[in-house]
Image (cartoon, rainbow, N blue to C red):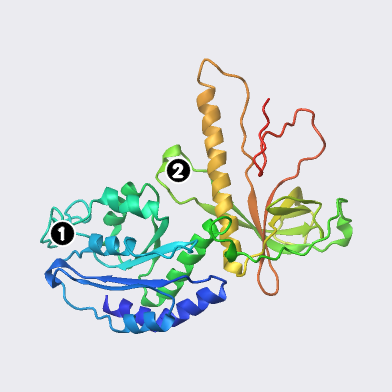
Amino acid sequence: MYSYINEVKEQIVEIVARLEASGCGIEGLAFVGYKDWCDGINHFEILPFTKSVSEFKSFVATICAKGGGDFPEDVLGGLSRAISLNWPQNSGTRIIFHLGDAPAHGKTIFHDGRRRDDYENGHPNDPPLQELFREMRRKKLMYYFGRINGECDRMIATFERYLGEKIETVDSAEVGNVLRSVMESVMRSVSVTHRTDFPSMVDKKLLPFNMDKKEPNWDQLPRLDGTILTFELPTSVEEITSFAKLQDKIKKCRLQIAPNPFAKGSVRLAYFGKIFYSSSKDANSSASESVDGVVFKEIISPPKVADLDCWRYRSDLEVQTVAAKLAKEFNFRLFKTHHNPNITMKFLKTKVARVFKDVAPRYLAYEQRFRGVSPNMVKYTNNVDFVHDA
């Protein structure tokens, strides 16, 4: 771990500077270094949470990679110390970023046994995994693992079974990736918690807009270059419950967006729009062009950093995609029963558009436009706890 510890020493100031520039109000930084039982019972180096970057930097500068005996390390002890820290009460997003190159003690449980393990059945003082991850969930800690090599893959798979959810592993094989890995972890975490637990991650100001319920004159609007992001539906419910990564698809397009929204909700602005797809090699040719009428939806509270904007739209899209698969699975199973109501449930699957701009790209969710008014359309719920009783 020598080179990785040195990388953290050198980049910690840059990491904190980037986090603060992104609008993240840092409530505290802490550090837990662990070794192994052969290095003495107190084989931990711990800095409790501090708001002082200089204090954190000074502490990390004293850390040295030395000691060790067999292959595994006291990973469980180190993780327990990190979870047991006095986490700041005001922190909306709480992250453990774990960087390691060796698994915990325990043959066949955490590693394949090819290398020496002085505690093949685990150390007698290892904390129970069930209690460890129960406390992690209780404190709402988001756990990321910086993957340096494949030695910890089995351990992470075991951790996932006890945590009950997918553990994001971030590629840290190259020493220079540590900064990027930490930043990516923070952006992913904040994108999940920004709406309720951490409102400071979005700008308190709203996007400027003027409402216009009329459809624009499309002949006078420019066509913008962009891409469309979609996720493939999971092939099975097991893929969902095992937290398999969704496969994404990105397609180039040109699009038009009305300059003003025609409607406003509590979270998003809605715009009329069109998307143009061309099957011709000439992107400017309209000979074999297809056009979709859509409604673009833009989150009304802008983020303080463009990367956060991308992740909050992606996280919404993941939820929509999983819900669409579950709706199809429900229909399939319902139709096989004796109580077939001959009704199909369909979850409207949205997509994400990225519009290229001079500075930061603009992101919008969109869905197919529904035209006309149908007497069969009934709204059963909304975002402010309305429920239709019929």
> Mark 2: few, some, or many residues within 10 Å (few <14, many ≥20)?
some
Whichever of labels 1 and 2 marks the residue nearer the N terminus, that label is: 1
Using the image as rendered, state which of residue 95 and residue 350 is in the foreground: 95
Q: Quadrant of the N terminus?
A: bottom left
Secondary structure of the residue carrying numbered label 2: helix
In the image, residue 387 sits, relative to residue 7, either above or below, namely above
The residue indicated by pointer 1 is: 114
Using the image as rendered, state which of residue 363 and residue 83 is in the foreground: 83
In the image, residue 115 sits, relative to residue 63, either above or below, namely above
Q: Position of residue 366 (x, y in %)?
A: 69, 51
User: Which quadrant of the structure image shows residue 346?
Assistant: top right
| Residue 279 shows up from this direction | no
Secondary structure of the residue carrying numbered label 1: loop
Q: Position of residue 282 (x, y in %)?
A: 73, 62
Front tag of 1 and 2: 2
Tell me the amino acid under the disc marked 2: Ile
The residue indicated by pointer 2 is: 240
Q: Position of residue 160 (x, y in %)?
A: 34, 50
Q: Position of residue 118 (x, y in %)?
A: 10, 61
Tell me the amino acid under the disc marked 1: Arg
In the image, residue 73 sits, relative to residue 313, either above or below, namely below
| Farthest left residue in view | 118
User: Which quadrant of the structure image shows residue 83?
Assistant: bottom left
Using the image as rendered, state which of residue 266 and residue 170 is in the foreground: 266
